[in-house]
Structure formats: C-alpha cells, structure tokens
Amino acid sequence: MKIKQLRTSGCTSAVRKLLASLLLLASATVVQAADVVGDTLEVRFRVGQSNLDMNYADNAKVIDDFVNRVKTHYQRMPDKSLKLEVYGGASPEGPAELNRRLGEERGVTLKNILMERLGTLVDKVTVINQGARWGAFYKTVEASNEPWKYEVLKSLAQEQGQDEWKVDPREEKLRNMRKGKIWKTLSDKYLAPLRTSGSAVIVPMTEEERCCDTLVIRDTIVYLPDRCPQYADPIDHTPVIALKTNFLLWGVIAPNAQVEVPLGTKNRWSIEGEVFWPWWIWNHNTNAHQCGDVGLELRYWLGDRMKHHLIDGWHIGLGVGAGYYDFEWLIGEKHKGYQGEYLNVYGNFGYQHRWGKRKQWAIDAGVGFGWIPTNYREYLGSSIFPVGHEEEPDGTKEDPHLMWQKTSWKHIVGLTHANITLAYIIRTSKKTKIYTSIDDERIPVYEPAPEPLTGAEAGKEAQRLEKQGRTVPAASPAGTKAAKAPASSVSYAATSSQPTKADKKAAKAAAKQAEKEAKAAAKAAAKQAEKEAKAAAKAEIEAEKAAKKAAKQAAKEAKKAK
C-alpha cells in the first residue's frame, strides 16, 4: 500500500511538471504572439500624391526596419501565419470623393511595396481605405488643450455633406470660425500630418483564416470611412433656471431667495433677482427686526465659455437694490429705533461652481463694494400712554406708538453686499447631444482606383457609387471636372489650401476693374438714354409743328375752295 502511494505520488509529480512545462510553453507562445500583433509601420506621402517617395521623410529606413521586424516575427510565430492591414487615407480637406480615391491609391501603393519585399511571408493583406480622415482629425483636436477645442468638436460632430464632389460644409464652417483665426492653427498643426500619412499594422488572424490554407486573399480593398465618433457635449449649455438662497442672510435671521437666469446664447450674461424679508417683532412690539429688500444684478461671466457650463465660473456684476427697514432695540432703559428707506448700488465679484451628476447643484460666493444712501427717522419707543394692549400686572398698558426724534440722511460707502449661496439648478429643456452616427460597415471594393474618366464613364462611375450608398451627382459640373482628372494627380492646393496674397491681390484688382467698367457702362447707357430722350422730344415737337402746318394748310385750301 505504501509502495502504491509512493508511485501515485511520483506520477502526480510528473504530471504536474508536464503541465507546468506546457503552461510555460503556451505562455511563451502567447507572449510571442502579443509581441507580434500590433507592430505598426507609418510612412509619409507627399502632399496630394499617391506615389511613395523613398527619399522623403525617412520612408526607406522605416520600411526596411518594418520588413526586418516582420521577418523576425515570422520566425517566432509557431503557426507561421501573419496578416497585414494597410491603411490609406487623406486629410478631410476638399471633396470627399477625391480623398476616397487618393486614400485607396495610397493604400494600394504601400501594399504593393510591402508585398514585393515580404513575398510569401504574409498570408493575408487587406487594404483599408479610410478616405477623408475626419475621425483622426477629431481625435487629435480632442486630445489637445486648445481654448476653442469644444467649439471645433461641435462643428466636426455635425452631419457630413451629402454631395461627395463638393467641399464638406463642416470644413467651410471651420474655415470661417472666428474670422479664420482657428483654421490657420488647425491647418498647420492638426491637418498637416493627415495630409501625408499611410500605415500598416500586423493584426491577429481569425480561426477561420487559419484553417483555410487554400484561401489566400492578397488584394482585398475595403472602404471604411474614418468618421467622427459619437459625441456628447461635456459642457452643459442647456437653458436653466437657478433657485438660490444666501446663507449669510440666514445668519442674521433673514429669510431670502434668489433666482438666476442666463441671457443670450453665448454663455456670457445672466441676471439675478433677489428678495429678503426678515419681519420680526417680539417682546410686546418693543423690539423690531424688519427689512424688506428687492434687488437685481446683471452678471458677466469671465473666461472661455466653451470650457464652462452655463452660469459656472468667475463672474463680475453690477447690482442695484432698494428697501425699507425698521430696527428697534433696548439701549439702557430706553427702546431706540430707526426706520427708513435705502438704495444699494454695488459692483460684485465672485465665483460659482456647479457640481452633481447632472450639474444640478451650485455654490456661489461673492463680495460687492458700493454706495448706500438712506433717509432714516430716529425714534424712541414708549410704554406710558394708557392705550394699546391689555393691562399688565403692574397696572400699566403697552403702547405701540413711537416718539420721533429726528430725520436725517446717511451715506455708506464700502462693502455693501456679500453672499455664500446654495443653488438648485432646473433645466428648462432637455440636454442637447450633438453627435454623428458611427458606421462600422466595411464596404468591399475589389477593383483598384479608377482611371481618369470621360463624360460617359463619369455617369457609370456615379451609378456604381450609388449602388454602394455613396450618391454622386453625375451631372454636377464640379463632379465632371473632378472625374476627368486622375485621382493620383489631385492637387492639394486645389482642394485644401487657402488663397495666397497674390490671389487676393489679383481678385481685388479684378473687382476694381469690374466696378470701373460697370460704372463706365452705366454712365454711357445713361448718356445714350438721355440723348435718345432729347431726340424723341425734338421729333415730337417737329411732328406737332408739321401737324399744325398741315391743318392750317388744309383750312386755307378749304376756304379757297369755297
């Protein structure tokens, strides 16, 4: 029995060692596969070109390094199977159809170069044409810290243009944003890399692809538009009403309420209304703490409002308030009080912060410096007159009447307003989400990019694109013109660059010349019309004279005949 136990123990130990070896081997294989998958190549095309210049931007060295890495990966892979995805695309500037053709030609060019260098080491190659790379453009702007980032992202998230032969409306909007100041930074900093890039990446093969050894696809071309991702505005600009109360006024037993409402659509202005009403009397009307106040404050919100929620952040304001007060208290043995009316004009500076899951809460703190003029009446309280309330135990009666002492004006300059306010924010409409739909459907295109098209061929091309869900008006003059030019020779300047100074100068001169010619033509036409009018008037006068002469002659002949 002991021998059997020892043998069983030895067998178990051997099995454990075998399992451990297999696990180590499997983990090493997984590590090797993980090292292989995701290895990326990135090259640079010249602007507007689909031919890859090996002497441009270290392309030759980059490709050599990638090919050597692929060969190393091939030796390490246990099943000797590699798959490449080659990406081609273009900057989103210009017509979408031209960018689609340029992206496809770039992808095919890079694929042919890699296949020539790698031969049979790669089992499957897929060219993914991203066309106009709006998605990559969106991500680079999203990762930036530009002050106008959210303004640009909102524009990118709009629906794309329907006519693929024309410049996308989003590009036109970006070009005109803030009088073209933003576009220069976008063009130089964020669009420049997208105009020239092409890439390839090693991706894992599926089980179906691994088992089908006889099916080797090397020339698959897939059109996968690089569209903007779904976007919801992280900054809440939904119209709101804020209901508020000031803790500092509650500290002096003053019930109060405020209401703040944004003004306009640029998140710059708001108006706040305030009212407080402590109306307390006690000790048989011999003490009073009464004040009624109504005020308004116009606020201007500072900073980049595209980075802030509505009514959130630093603000300055101009406020005005008016009210009535009556304060009476015991001083020594006398009850002394003041009544009056006042005006409060102040400038306010503060900060308001919104928080909560729906940004439904806010805390606001601020101080205001200003001027309070008040016309007050000083009085003494009295309890000696036999009128008023019921008798007290000592036989006297309370008298609510006051004994006036004097009337005067007082002016207060300094800290006249302060607040630490809690607010609950109510949305007056649903939060607007600005987004574009994500289309992950890959459209297979197995033919290479088309050659330069004639008029009849352009119509056929339009029909083909319509079947794939990309409507292109064949009768469009812009489309016909674009179709006649080869996609590989698309001029970048024609589709994406701004007018040069020389172009602007020539356009200005042409406009001046046209205006001059129009004025000259109008002047000549006016002169000619005046001349013709004079001639017509003269002819009319002569005709009238001739008619009179003829009538006179006829009368004379008639008289002679008698």
Image: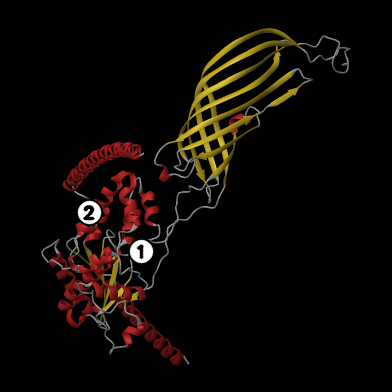
Residue 536: x and y in percent read: 28, 40
Residue type indicated by callout 1: Arg
* On screen, residue 295 above or below 241: above
Res 497 label = 2
In the foreground, 266 or 520: 520
Marks 2 & 1, CB-CB < 8 Å contact: no
How crowded pointer 2 is (Cα within 10 Å; few <14, some 14-19, many 20+) is rated as: few
Mark 2 lies on a secondary structure that is: loop
Residue 270: x and y in percent read: 50, 37
Q: Mark 1 sits on what residue?
A: 227
Residue sitting farthest toward the left: 55
Residue 487: quadrant of the picture: bottom left
The answer to which of marks 2 and 1 sits earlier in the sequence is: 1
- Counting every numbered tag in the picture gives 2
Residue at 20% x, 46% y is: 507
Scheme of image coloration: secondary structure
Residue 296: x and y in percent read: 56, 30
* On screen, residue 294 above or below 180: above
